Image: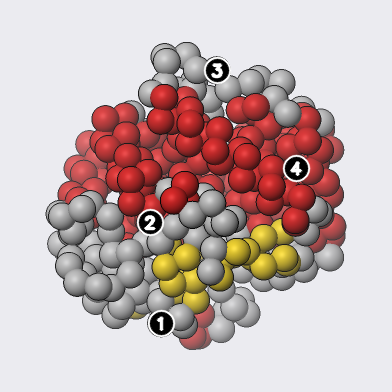
Amino acid sequence: MEKLVDRKQAPDWVKSELDRICSILEKNMIRFKTNFPSACATNGKYRIKKNDDWTNGFWTGMLWMAYEYTGKETFKELAYENLKSFEKRLEEHFILDHHDIGFLYSLSVGAGYRILKEEHWKDVLLRAADVLVSRFQERGGFIQAWGKMGEEKEYRLIIDSLLNLPLLYRASELSHDPSYKEKAEIHYQNVIKNIVREDYSTYHTFYFNKETGLPDHGATHQGFSDQSCWARGQAWAILGMPLHARISGEGMSKEERELYEKIVEYFETHLPVDKMPYWDLIFMDGDQPRDSSALAIVACGMLEMKNEKRAKEMLLTLKELASSKVDPQSEGLLLHGVYAYAEGKGVDEPNLWGDYFYMEALCRIYDPEWEPYW
Ligand code: GLY
């Protein structure tokens, strides 16, 4: 096993946060056993769930990172049990009629394959990529995010999809079949062309005309309004674009880099004075809830861009304002996230992706040579 190595003497606070995180995960493992924590917490506690949501990969991904950081076999043993659950879910096609197959399988089976080097998991990963690619809509050229394929009210992509694409590039690399990455590339170009507004904010979702395949209109699903900028959506772009550049092997063209910098600038200039984003960037002060998970995702984007200085500042903001250190009862790693504000879901609570990206960013700083699982 390649253990994470403190190559450049990470700051003490990075190590102490990682140590703290691993002890919370150890406690959580005892409660969740081979089940999974729910997507978001309620009063700081996750519910015990089956492998049935879009978020289960974050839990397994954290177990793999904890294994690589500590070398403790208990993390590996449970992560391995999780892999069997992901394989069963795939066999039964259980709640997989959506595009979040990358979030689910890159961080669980993809990570497991990388760490264990067992060929079996490569096959499972490729089968997961088949499920994702089957959602590609030729008319329009995009991967349909949700719902029944071809349904008019669901004829759209969403910005979160950028994190599902690495699975397709990996699938082409592992299978030598270019069709996965060809579809991923068409989808990616369609995201970039349509979802970024003139002021460099982003729509959460974007519709295509079902009959003609032409771009139609942007809308929100989890943001404040169709014209506002959902903080996590902007964050998915800030991480998803450099991830695409690296994993696709395409890099970033000058034009794309300029666009990227403007998207980051929009995020940065819509932060409140304490630098912790509100759940929608339309808010810059007042008592609306914050979304710490958006900042954790952006910190990973900064690290993907090799901007360690800004990433560290963001992580320090998270540590000062949202680390669950202040609440020893919390099962989450990061307080003050928002899942879906309008539904009152996971508001001002930890959530699994906030925990995951906080830990991923800390691992990236701890060992700059470590490659995240995407
Ligand atoms: N991908 C769903 C979310 O960010 O809430």
Foreground pick, 120 / 32 = 32
Identify residue for label 3.
5
Question: Which is more N-terminal, label 4 or label 3?
Answer: 3
The residue wearing badge 2 is: 292
Where the C terminus falls, by quadrant?
Answer: top right
Relative image position of residue 257 (x, y in whole percent): 25, 40
Please indicate, yes or no, whether residue 85 appears anywhere in the rendered image: yes
Left or right: where 294 falls relative to 32 = left
Measuring 54% from the left and 51% from the top, which residue is drawn there?
Answer: 328
The amino acid beneath tag 2 is: Ser
What's the CA distance linking mark 1 and mark 4? 34 Å
Instruction: State the residue in front, 39 or 114.
Output: 39
Real-space CA distance between mark 2 and mark 4, rounded to the nearest whole angstrom? 26 Å
Of mark 2 and mark 1, the one earlier in the sequence is 2
| Element on which disc 3 rests | loop
The residue under label 1 is 342
Rounded to the nearest angstrom, the CA distance separating label 2 from label 1 is: 17 Å
Look at the numbered disc 1 and give the secondary structure of its residue.
loop
Residue occupying the point 40% across, 41% down: 300
User: Given the image, on which type of amino acid does mark 4 rest?
Assistant: Ala
Q: Are marks 3 and 4 in contact (CB under 8 Å)?
A: no
